[in-house]
Amino acid sequence: MDALWCLIAAIVISAAPATGRAEQLSFYGTPGLIDMPSAQVMPDGNFAVTSGYFGGNLRNTLSFQITPRLSGAFRYAVIDGFQSDGATLYDRSFDLHLALLPEGAVMPSVAMGLRDFGGTGIYSSEYLVASKSIGPDLTITAGLGWGRLGARDGFANPLGRLSDHFDTRPDVGEGGIGTTGQLDFGAWFRGDAALFGGVTWQFAERATLVAEYSSDTYVREAERGVVRQTSPLNLGLRYGFENGVDVGIYSLYGTGVGASLSYVSDPARPAIPGGREAAAPSIMPRDLVAGAGWNRQDDDAELRDVLRLRLGAEGIDLRGLTVEAGTARVQMENQRWPVPAQALGRTARIVANTLPPGVRRFELTFVTRGMPVTMVSLARDDLEALEHDVDGAALMLARAQITDAADVPPIGQGAALSLDLSPYLDLSYFDPDRPVRADLGLQLSVRYSPAPGLMFSGLLRQPVIGNIGDATRVSDSVLPHVRSDAALYATGSDPEISQLTAATFFRPGRDLFGRVTVGYLEPMFGGLSAEVLWRPVDGLLALGLEINHVWQRNYDQGFGFQDYEVLTGHASAYYAFGNGFEGQINAGRYLAGDYGATVRLDRVFGNGFRIGAFATLTDASFEEFGEGSFDKGIVIEVPLTWLSGQPSRDVVRQVLRPVLRDGGARIQVADRLYDLTDGYRADDLADEWGKFWR
Amino acid sequence: MMRRFFLVLLLALTGCAADMAPVPDPTYAALMQAGVPVMQVGVEAAGTATFARRETLRGGIATFLTPDGVAVIVQDGMLRGTRGLGADMLASDIAASRELVLSMRSGRVERLHSFLDGEDRAAMRRYVCDIAVQGPRAIGLGTLQIDTVLLTEDCAGSEEEFVNYYWVLPAARRVVQSRQWGGAFSGMIVMRDVAP
């Protein structure tokens, strides 16, 4: 389930097609004509995958409408014979597109954008573009381009009137591999400019004709004989299928024929909104509950057993029950529900259907890894009154008291053991020799918890088949090889100990969480890891501190260590900006001993679908870091529930890095406290409260 | 429109025995033993039809479970909510409709639905509905022929329109057969009492 393209295929298969697909995606996978951009935007939150091919140029693009006005794209291009020695060029690039003005009755929509603003610079260009629809079927686009888009009949830069600075564009990508990946902002909007434009005509319900005048002369491709142009005009025909897939065929520059395939999906609209899992038990009349056999006994033993069984059938483990003075205190651990509010709502109904009628208040505490996290107190009368109320979700939330559970005493439990044998798929991207490599095998996961808050866990992997270890490129990194020897860790066919740890989890105080982990933390490092997190039950800010002393493990992932050891750790700040935006800053010392900080920004949908980007700058210089200059990437997380409509806490997660090098690398530890507590604090519970009654 | 509807209803309600899930939900299996009231339920868009058994009756609101764990929540035969169909109707306020339908009167009313959306939020929708008495209809319930009154409820909201059909048994003041809208995602749901 690790595979990005499998993930995309699964999204394509299971998602409802996005609505309002008026936007047109160009060969660059972003709103536009064919090679030229337009001022259009995708609907907010939409996510698009595009592949386009013509004359030796393959462009694969992921693009995402980050806000209603701002979109970003990541592209992996393959250009046959582009390199000076005739070799194929594999190129990664990032784009940004910002809508400046929406379309009015008379005024066109206006947008500006940056293509390839941080890559090797082959697509480096900027534009200012306007689009206007004329009637329902026709859209006209005209724009001004710089860089690559300022090549055909380029004229003196109009911005030169503001400053001489804009008159000439410094050569980008000429500094060799060492400069790649640095932001090229020194070149933005500089040098000659040129005009481009085009027309789209939607002549049938699903079919569109596109014509454009391209200002891109493909100078470097022409020099290397990859692309030959005899005309600036491109023509295309696009057809949008009902399932959300668009195909296009094109005539390009008078000499080439191209094709594109794209798919737009809306993460806010899973195939089955809200899921299709079986109904929760509905609340029974209280007098029927009173008559149940276990409520006519003197002691609570049978009551506890019934509650344990009933909760267990719903994937919720009962960790403790006390009943006194009309209040029931229930501790439970959610094992099944991706949305904690749903686990809470099911627990509340089962408790109401089980406990004697004199119990008027339920204090339900979420427990994870033995730590009581959050307590939600509900009145039984409210549950009964609001179950079928049209505004029942909002009213129930308003009447629930949500508090930190640090004071809730942990209740002892029997030892718990879980074993899980499953296949795994590991992927490695963007090796120029083979852009996607994969390892397939079997893994055994063991978890044993002898007491609350104490957890032994292991992950043993047996590779079966794969080619990650076949990579022949030897790391040329001048930094300690903390990540760049990944291929060496993937060679060999013996069982690998991916993880083997003992961990303890505790609540040092109100709103505080603690963790200490020791052992083989991850495939490449082992040692000691300690963390404390401050995450108030009501609040948008959380702060964490983590320190690790780790040793690099042997390539065989056995018990041995290499000589390299490092003290690494970070101070972290997490902030929920609202509207689904979450930010995170980690500052500290990384695995290679470099000091710096990582900034990450995510957009999270209410259903748990997450798309984020991160970048790390450290005191390792761009030269020391090597190709890419600094660590950066994109994170995509899709809840399995989003794909299947069935409840699961599993998440399909992919981190896409243009290059994985040794600078800015962070230790991977299982069960970081922010992740463990995520979803269980008041704001997260409230955001997904719609599932309380589901 | 009406012809197609009757065809669908007929197909849905007669095809039900063949569509029984082989392994019923455990709660449903227990209800089979308990001899609780039974209702035939069909979801037109999914082409499914089955017997649903009453799990709970509290405050006049009944929850019926199908063998695959879908819950249909009704009050006097009028739909109040669903669970397990996707984008479920979490709850509704149909008090004004219910009063007119059960007393077999025409008129204009408002109803409210709250649906679970794709981001797990409860989204409230308001509809204005015209209820009209269509006249007496004899229908078959099992081997019985019974005389009912057919009412339609023609609703329009800001985003959706739908028409509900109710066959009301005058003596019992309850809907014994119906075709009601479960939401934009689940579509029309057909229900019929099993011999009262």
Image (cartoon, rainbow, N blue to C red):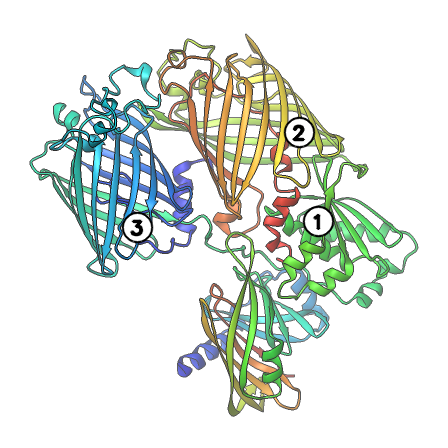
**Residue A376 percent coordinates (x, y):** 73, 48
What amino acid type is highlighted by mark number 2?
A: Leu
Which chain hosts label 3?
A
User: Is A505 placed left or right of A152 in the picture?
Assistant: right
User: Is A478 placed left or right of A126 in the picture?
Assistant: right
What amino acid type is highlighted by mark number 1?
A: Gly
- The residue to which callout 3 is attached is A23
- Give the mark, 3 or 2, whose residue is nearer the N terminus: 3
Circle nearer the viewer, 2 or 1: 2
**Residue A662 percent coordinates (x, y):** 45, 16
**Residue A120 percent coordinates (x, y):** 29, 23
Q: Secondary structure at mark 1?
A: helix
- The residue to which callout 1 is attached is A312
Characterize the local packing of mark 3: few (<14), some (14-19) or many (20 or more) Cα atoms within 10 angstroms: some
Q: On the rendered image, what quadrant is the C terminus of chain A found in?
A: bottom right
Identify the residue at image location x=23%, y=30%.
Answer: A159
Q: Secondary structure at mark 3?
A: loop
Rendered image: mark on residue A533? 2
Q: Quadrant of residue A396 in the image? A: bottom right
What amino acid type is highlighted by mark number 3?
A: Glu
